[in-house]
Image: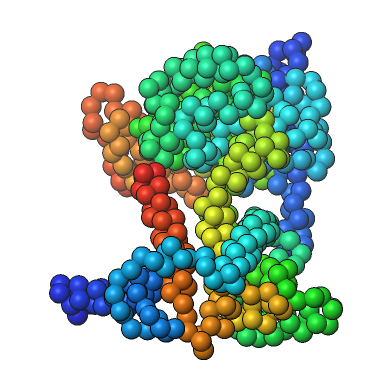
Amino acid sequence: MRLFRGRGLQIYTWLVIAWLIVPIAVMVLFGFNDTKGRYNSTFQGFTLKWYGKLFEIGDLTQALVNSLLIAVLTMLIAGVLGSLIGLALGRYRFRGSGAMNVVMFAAISCAEIVMGASLLSLFVTLAVPLGFWTIVISHVMFSISFVAITVRARVMTLDASLEEAARDLGAGTWTTFRLVTLPMIFPGVLAGSMLAFALSIDDFVITNFNSGGTVTFPLWIWGSTRVGIPPQVNVMGTLIFAAGLLIALGNALVARRRR
Amino acid sequence: MTEIQAGTGAAGVAAPDQVPAIELDGVVKEYVSHGEVVQAVKGVSLAIGEGEFFSLLGPSGCGKTTSMRMIAGFEEPTRGVVRLHGQDVTNVPPNKRDVNMVFQSYALFPHMNVWDNVAFGLKRKKVSDDEVRSRVGEMLEIVDLVGREKRRPREMSGGQQQRVALARALVNRPRALLLDEPLGALDLKLRQHMQIELKRIQREVGITFVYVTHDQSEALTMSDRIAVMNDGLVEQLAGPREIYERPATKFVAGFIGTSNLLSGVVRAMNGASAVLALGPEDRVVVPIKGSATEGDTVELTVRPEKITISTEQPEGDLSMVEGTVSEVVYLGTYNSYAVALAGGAEITVFQQNAHDSTTTAERGDTVWLSWQPQHSYALQ
């Protein structure tokens, strides 16, 4: 404990922050690189032109659109289904609820490469054509447990008499859910859904197995590494990161105001 | 001790020509727990009159909360009927019952402010906006929370939250208000204050209150009538004075206040009283409700404050026993003596410190305890 007192702790904290932030800073910086050649690896001067030419590479733009579409669909489907699972697991003991809990954790701890390969053999066996929808199905499949577990944790802290109070005051089942249960578990639903979005948008391993001819943002980047990653990728990365940062900051602000 | 007694007790006190506000008729509630059937309520029948302050009193696990939850509609009885104003509501869900409940945890909606919490029930009933405004405002005035409409529940003290919960239920003008240990989470001072507040509010709104508590002093202070419950059954149903002065069963005598239990063999019957044999010099006479014959063992109870302690054998038609003082405790307003009888029983006596604070007897002294025979009761 003494080791962490005073200056030692301060230095350690800044080291950790640097460790986490430097790769991101490099990504952001090279989005402003006035590179002349194909390789964007040495800094050659500051420019904003890549922001202007952001959508000039058609394949890359299409890949980003695919990724965003898949992530939003995953967020919505896994968000709704996962929340319902979490609600059921947190609130009721039912036949199979124990098994359900185990399966949820198994899905989280399963290696991506295994899950990707087995999903591929499943799709091939069932003769499902690979593409956009197999990616969505796989993403929902691996992110749903994260949503369910986040919501379940929230539900378990809920006072069950809140719902009874709503019923007592004349609210039916649906009204009780809409006015009391959902607002109470909403932070969990939101956190779980955003986690699903984040997991989906940068997934490479599972997507690579099940994408067929559809190219997502991470797949496109992987494909372009041999020929040189264009600065537009850095710009898109920067914008995605900035959006995430804004959401996180907004959330922190709202949380502070509530307190 | 069972349905019959509770039923007659209720009919005896509530006006017979009036339809009771709440009726439980032979209500049984069974649960299946770990594959075994457990009876939480084993057959309760009672009738609660309009405008009455009625308490369900008993230790935890006696079935009082389950009984209340069956009135509210959160539990369905396994057998028996629940009636509200004569109407069978046994299978009516809680949102369609004209009763409201104040929860032990208050169960205030944390994401709504005080106003929205209180207005919740009225909005569900599609009451017009104007009426919601006037009724919520009026109710917040009654519970003394004007000016705090915009507060969130967690920004308020326990006592204030308690009053919000009360307002939220009462604003719906229910036919009856159910309160599940509503003062349990408050400290003693606040609890005593809220007891008086609750009584005042009940007088003001004139609504039937059903109050679940394990706190006997709370029940005695506030109730018009009390049903003392134990192990899923009503042990006694009567007014506070009757419950305290004439406990019907050994359980009630032990649960309410401090009681002394004595047992003796009937030596002779003297009209409606039995003369019991205890020590050789002792003379104990106790009124008997049922029948007893010579040789029966009878248990009786007598409250500590009814007993007089003296060093001389008292005169007159008193019940009296001889014993040795084993403990004297000074308690400010009174002294408490523990007196051991020859037979092994120990009796507690309270003596008011009305005149001076010297004690009549010290530890080890031989004393006489005496009381009026009509202050002792034979237990069933």
Instruction: Determine the image quadrant of residue B374.
Output: top right
The residue at the point 43 percent across, 26 percent down is B149
Residue B277 is at least partly visible in this image:
no
The residue at the point 41 percent across, 51 percent down is A250
Q: In this view, does B71 lie to the left or right of B321?
A: right
Where is residue B287? Give x, y as percent: 62, 27
Q: Quadrant of the C terminus of chain A?
A: top left
Q: In the displayed orientation, state which residue is furthest to the top.
A: B17
Instruction: Determine the image quadrant of residue A247.
Output: bottom left
Instruction: Determine the image quadrant of residue B305.
Output: top left
Where is residue A58? Give x, y as percent: 58, 69
Residue A13 versus residue B298: which sits nearer the camera? Answer: A13
Residue B127 is at least partly visible in this image:
yes
Q: In the displayed orientation, state which residue is furthest to the bottom.
A: A226
Q: Is residue B356 left or right of residue B87?
A: left
Question: How are the colours assigned in the image?
Answer: rainbow
The residue at the point 48 percent across, 27 percent down is B115
Residue B96 versus residue A116: which sits nearer the camera? Answer: A116
Query: Does B141 appear above or below B185?
Result: above
Query: Does B147 appear above or below A176?
Result: above
The residue at the point 72 percent across, 79 percent down is A212
Q: In this view, does A58 lie to the left or right of B3?
A: left
Q: In the displayed orientation, state which residue is furthest to the left.
A: A7
Where is residue A217? Give x, y as percent: 56, 72
Query: Does B285 appear above or below B299?
Result: above
Where is residue A93? Give x, y as percent: 70, 60
Q: In this view, does B102 lie to the left or right of B359?
A: right
Q: Quadrant of the N terminus of chain A?
A: bottom left
